[in-house]
Amino acid sequence: MRDYELLGERLELDLAQLLHQRSLPLTPRLLRLVLDRPETARDLAERPEQALGCRALTEEAVVEALLALAFGLPAWQLEEALLHFLAGDGSRARPEARGL
């Protein structure tokens, strides 16, 4: 992830560093999800508004955002995720493949 500041300073951060800069404690669970699974981190970094919405940045919000992306949902909805999971439409493997 790259960010260009107004004064020309270029910062290169991975998602874990960015979350930490936003005052989110990096628990072993979060580190595993965003560092060990680059595809998961990339999806969240590409669509943060879709995945997180206006929610406060917490570990739970990040995990739910990652689950929403894994299930192909526009936002985290437990009921919708359960329907996809129970219907066996191929959604079961996606969260597991992403370490969720």
Image (cartoon, grey):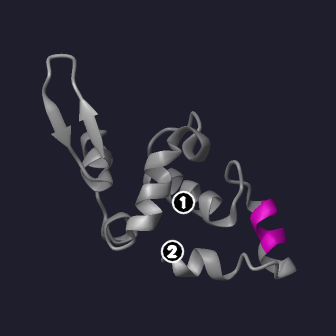
Identify the residue position indicated by label 2 in the image: 98
Do the CB atoms of the residues marked 2 and 1 lie less than 8 Å apart?
yes
- Of the numbered discs 2 and 1, the one sitting upstream in the chain is 1
Describe residue 85's horizontal placement relative to residue 41 as left or right. Answer: right
Whether residue 87 is situated above or below residue 28 in the rendered picture: below
Q: Position of residue 68 (x, y in %)?
A: 64, 58
Q: Residues within 10 Å of mark 2 (few under 14, many from 20)?
A: some
Identify the residue position indicated by label 1 in the image: 66
Q: Position of residue 32 (x, y in %)?
A: 34, 72
Write the start and end of the magenta stretch as one range.
Answer: 79-84
Residue depicted at 81% across the width and 61% down the height = 79
Most extreme residue toward the top is 7
Tag 2: residue type? Arg
Q: Position of residue 72 (x, y in %)?
A: 69, 60
Q: Position of residue 73 (x, y in %)?
A: 71, 55
Secondary structure of residue under mark 2: loop
Secondary structure of residue under mark 1: helix
Q: Which mark is residue 45?
A: none
Describe residue 72's horizontal placement relative to residue 20 as left or right. Answer: right
Principal secondary structure, stretch drawn in magenta: helix
Closer to the camera in the image, 23 or 11? 11
Residue depicted at 64% across the width and 82% down the height = 93
Identify the image quadrant of residue 66.
Answer: bottom right
